[in-house]
Image: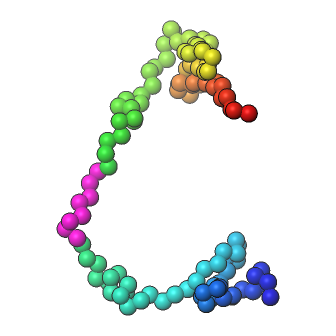
Amino acid sequence: MSESESCNSESDYGIEYEKEPWYNVKYTKEKFTPELLNKMKNPSVSEDIKLGDPPMNFLFPNDISILPSSEFDPKSPTLLLNNEDIEAWNFKCTKFNVPIVIACDNIYTND
């Protein structure tokens, strides 16, 4: 009997598997042990564990507001950086009022 024909099959370790119907992934059903049931019914809180805020993310900007449109906004993209490895342009989107960056990068391989 092939693996796809059987709904319940035993593994090399003697565990009875079932398959879920969509992706044919094997799974097992097991009863909780009395020790695990006791831990779930009577959880213990350790005083040694200290939870707190995550460390400050220094890469996140302090101000994410967008400057209002002005008459001095460029009407075409501005070249920010241009060298043998990268070319970067900047342009402010007038429709959604957000900055746009167009970056082109040259990647060299060893082949």
* Residue 50 is inside the magenta segment: yes
Residue at the outermost left position: 47
Residue in the image at 58% along x and 83% along y:
28
Which residue occupies the foreground of this view, 97 or 11? 11
Residue in the image at 45% along x and 25% along y:
66
One can see residue 91 in this view: no
Is residue 44 placed above or below 89 in the rendered structure? below
Q: Is residue 80 left or right of residue 58?
A: right
For the C terminus, give its image quadrant.
top right
One can see residue 104 in this view: yes
Is residue 51 placed above or below 87 in the rendered structure? below
Residue in the image at 61% along x and 90% along y:
14
Q: Is residue 46 left or right of residue 61?
A: left
Residue at the outermost top position: 72
**Residue 89 placement (x, y as % from top left):** 59, 18
Which residue occupies the foreground of this view, 104 or 83? 83
Which residue occupies the foreground of this view, 89 or 63? 89
**Residue 11 placement (x, y as % from top left):** 65, 85
Dividing the picture into quadrants, the one containing residue 2 is: bottom right
Image: magenta residue range: 46-53
**Residue 93 placement (x, y as % from top left):** 58, 23
**Residue 41 placement (x, y as % from top left):** 32, 84
Is residue 75 placed above or below 26 in the rendered structure? above
For the N terminus, give its image quadrant.
bottom right
* Residue 109 is inside the magenta segment: no
Residue at the outermost front position: 110
Dividing the picture into quadrants, the one containing residue 81 is: top right
